[in-house]
Amino acid sequence: MTDSRYETRSAEVEGPTDAGLGSSRALRLPSALRSLQALGPWARIGIAAALAVVLIGVFLTIDLGGAWQYILRRRSMTVLTMVLVGSAIGMATVGFQTITHNRILTPSVMGFDALFMMVVTVTIVMFGAARIQQAEDWTVFAIQAAVMMIVSTALYGWLLIGARRALHVLLLVGIILGVLLRSLISFIQRLLDPNEFQVLEDMSFASFNLTTVPALATAVVLLGIGIAVLLRLHRVLDVMALGRDLAVGLGIPYQRIQMLVLIAVTLLVSAATALAGPTTFFGLLVAHMAYATVASEKHRHTLPMAAVMSVIALVGGQLILERVLGFATALSVVVDFAGGLLFILLLIRKKGL
Amino acid sequence: MIICDGVTKRYGTTTVVDDVRLLIQTGGLTSIIGPNGAGKSTLLSMMARLLTMDGGRVSVDGLDVAATDSAVLARRLAILRQDNHLDIRLTVRDLVAFGRYPHSKGRPTIEDRVHVDRALDYMDMGHLADRFLDELSGGQRQRAFVAMTLAQDTEYILLDEPLNNLDMPHGVAMMSVLQRAAKELGKTVVVVIHDINFASAYSDRIIAMREGRVIEQGTPAEIVTPPVMQEVYGLTVDVVEHGGHPFALYFHASAVRPTDEAEAAPSGQETGRVR
């Protein structure tokens, strides 16, 4: 195969077609941006992380005022929650998209957090809000997490693992499942007494201001496990991204890894939902922010970048909302709006879904 | 050597691969031929544990493919299906480097890089190594995937229709490379192939399948004969000899339509895509 046929063949190929990483596109950009484009993945993650740290610093210290100790403590809790929830959702989304081989579905779109809210609702109905509030945070959460783990691995394991289903089928199932679960939840809520209703209502909207120290501690442990699993598997995930046949051919225990990642994702989404409530399109938004900026398909780059982007989106978004725009609407509304737009955009761009 | 013992695959009531007993000797290039729906690709996928069997067993050098650790098999046998589509954006070198995963587990050594470069050169892809796959033609992409299987450096290389997407010169080049890999590197290459004449010109052995069964196997001279072609394809052909290889002239042959059974097999089963 040393003949010249290949040279003529390669000359037919048109220039870089998409995604903006090609060199010819860089020429049209100003020089500052061009040097940014030459940066390696780690440099990009470093810059993003620095930005995240600056944002956190500003968020903590801006307008501290008189009761600064109290305010600082409160804000630290909020930031810690944001970092935990953000990294969890960001990494869970990247891991989930890799094992399901698409970049449109996310755990939230597939109804993971609706399922978790359902589990929470049912436990409240069964045990009563009073008893749940009296009990130690971690016991309740442990029960809920265990139930969630069983239900979700059974349901999503059946849906996503083994049989290869078309993307639009999964999308439909996920959306309908989400609607069904949310309708069921609101139906059950109507049957509850006002106190129980209030407890649920507080949980049903994404918020970063309601966490307590024990809840945070529990979440740190669970999120730590989930994140550790994903990070440990980063090389395997790189191979998984090639698709089933190639991954199996390269010796990956494909279904076992899918299941393991699914369990880690369930853990992450459950803990994050328990801390901050459901975040429908947040994962999609930050995962795509990470893919677009990190310039690498390796999970050792995309996973940390997704976490950093989550922190930037949450802390930066909150800052802009509170300080610049000056209104106190929930961040989740804005994030879901932006994420929802991205979702529609991705659906339109993905021809022949 | 690869031994298939009673290998069977069914989809519902349709038996796609039916009690196949087969022995593929080490070394050389073996082609599996047959009409659409004969079960060639399905058989190849089962040999490489990409598809589960409904009966029988396959062993590679004595290792039962259904029971052996997949990572162990990956160092002994490489498989490439047709229609490889990637969701992610990789350069040719990135892709070929994945072929080293069974050896390096994602931590490439200098030796792994040598293997990658060698595979790239072997497929004449060196000058395209840093191009993204989505910037390449179908044929170039196909060669990149084959380079990846070569980089895996396994004793056995199984390729499902490697001539897909390739025009005539690239098809010839591909088969020459595979023949060279078998001869020079001592690999055992098994390919599923549609064109009987490509099989005849480059194979050491040909396995002919029809309706899920192996009906003939032997050297090209034994297989590419009017009676066997009639049996396999249901087509009356002339066979001429050129350069020591028999070639089937199937154009304007007095065609007998393929039998109903062969036609009735759903087309998806040819590629084993039904799951």
Image (cartoon, coloured by chain):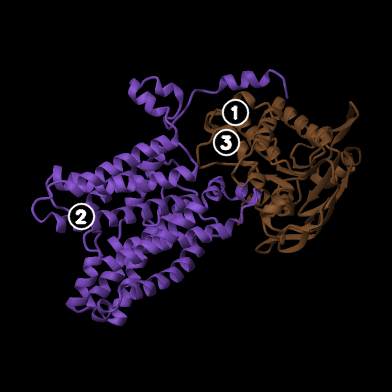
Give the residue at the far left of this rendering. Answer: A66
Pinpoint the chain carrying mark 1: B
User: Which mark, by number, is residue B94?
Assistant: 3
The residue positioned 13% from the left and 50% from the top of the image is: A64
Mark 3 and mark 2: Cα distance apart in space: 44 Å
Q: Quadrant of residue A195?
A: bottom left
Whether pointer 3 and pointer 1 mark residues with C-beta atoms closer than 8 Å, the reply is no
Of the chain colours in the picture, the one used for chain A is: purple
Q: Residue at x 24, y 53 (%)?
A: A332
Q: Residues within 10 Å of mark 2 (few under 14, many from 20)?
A: some
Q: Amino acid at mark 3?
A: Asp
Residue bearing mark 1: B129
Name the residue at 73% across, 24% down.
Answer: A1
Q: Secondary structure at mark 1?
A: loop
- Foreground: B12 or B164? B164
Q: Which residue is mark 2?
A: A75
The reply, left or right, for residue A280 in relation to residue B245 is left
